């Protein structure tokens, strides 16, 4: 009965404009970051990033039509950009070491989940002709395999883009903070916008062109993943400036 509720809810949301669901996810992600910080300190941020990087790499497999852009666009952008807010919060209110640690924890969580799910689909599924009451399990195995079978282009591109862009983000943020500690809005936006360009460039070219067995034409890639998604990332980067200031009020009393 609960499953029917979520199916009906999902159907209702499907009828909404894409932008509405997009905004719901933005609000949910940013509030989750603030609440994680409030109740668990930087440990909460570590957990959020570890979960976000896993889910973002699943979301990116789904492509939807987005208003104002001629080509369909892959999901995952909101989760990815929210990770930059997390490292900026750690860099600002804790230290550079904590932000760097967050990168390695995120990559470790992604690799761990990839290996675990690969081992999961490696188990031989039951024969539905023998175990007729468990036929749904075979169908579930097929679905899990479709989603979690490791795709080298996605894995390699995601790790390379994530690592390099996050390291650059932390470096620029720290550099600007040392130059002028008063302009939080400046270092937050400059570091994120530049590093997002690098992340977008590396991931899209590696995942969907260089390493792909079915390369997306460069023009379509530039329009949909290059210009389109990068413009969205810039908007989100400007928007998350509000939340990095608000985050100060969500710091736990005893900073861990």
Image (cartoon, rainbow, N blue to C red):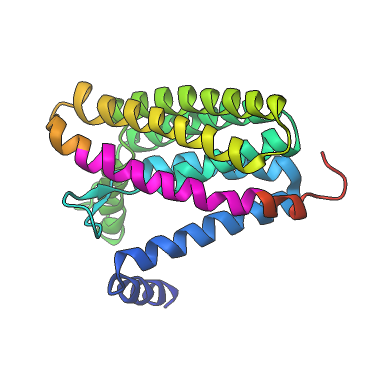
Which quarter of the figure has residue 155?
Answer: top left
Residue 86's place in the image compared with 21, above or below, is: above
Q: Is residue 143 left or right of residue 168?
A: left
Q: Is residue 216 visible?
A: no
Viewer-proximal residue among 249 and 119: 249
Q: Is residue 41 left or right of residue 235?
A: right
Quadrant of the image for the N terminus? bottom left
Image position, residue 37 (x, y; %): 71, 49
Residue 64 falls inside the magenta stretch: no
Image position, residue 232 (x, y; %): 37, 48
Residue 226 falls inside the magenta stretch: yes
Quadrant of the image for the C terminus? top right
Viewer-proximal residue among 44 and 197: 197
Which quarter of the figure has residue 80?
Answer: top left
Residue range corresponding to the magenta coloring: 223-244
Residue 147's place in the image compared with 152, above or below, is: below
Q: Is residue 11 visible?
A: yes
Q: What main secondary structure does the magenta stretch of the protein show?
A: helix
Q: Which residue is found at the position 59% from the left and 22% from the top? A: 171
Image position, residue 211 (x, y; %): 23, 22
Q: Which residue is found at the position 33% from the left and 49% from the top? A: 75
């Amino acid at each position: 009965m609960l499953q029917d509720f979520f199916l009906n809810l999902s159907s209702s949301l499907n009828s909404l404009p894409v932008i509405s669901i997009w905004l719901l996810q933005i609000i949910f992600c940013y509030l989750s970051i603030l609440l994680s910080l409030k109740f668990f300190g930087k440990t909460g941020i570590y957990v959020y990033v570890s979960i976000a990087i896993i889910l973002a790499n699943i979301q990116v497999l789904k492509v939807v039509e987005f208003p104002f852009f001629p080509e369909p666009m892959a999901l995952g952008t909101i989760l990815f950009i929210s990770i930059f807010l997390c490292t900026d919060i750690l860099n600002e209110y804790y230290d550079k070491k904590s932000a760097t640690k967050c990168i390695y924890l995120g990559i470790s969580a992604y690799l761990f989940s990839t290996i675990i799910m690969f081992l999961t689909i490696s188990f031989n599924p039951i024969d539905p002709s023998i175990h007729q009451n468990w036929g749904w399990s075979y169908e579930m195995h097929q679905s899990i395999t479709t989603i979690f079978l490791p795709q080298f282009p996605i894995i390699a591109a995601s790790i390379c883009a994530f690592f390099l862009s996050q390291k650059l983000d932390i470096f620029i943020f720290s550099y600007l903070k040392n130059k002028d500690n008063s302009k939080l809005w400046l270092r937050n936006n400059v570091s994120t916008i530049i590093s997002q360009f690098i992340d977008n460039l590396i991931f899209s070219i590696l995942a969907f062109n260089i390493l792909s067995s079915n390369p997306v034409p460069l023009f379509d890639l530039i329009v949909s993943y290059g210009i389109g998604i990068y413009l969205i990332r810039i908007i989100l980067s400007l928007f998350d400036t509000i939340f990095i200031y608000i985050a100060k009020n969500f710091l736990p009393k005893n900073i861990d």
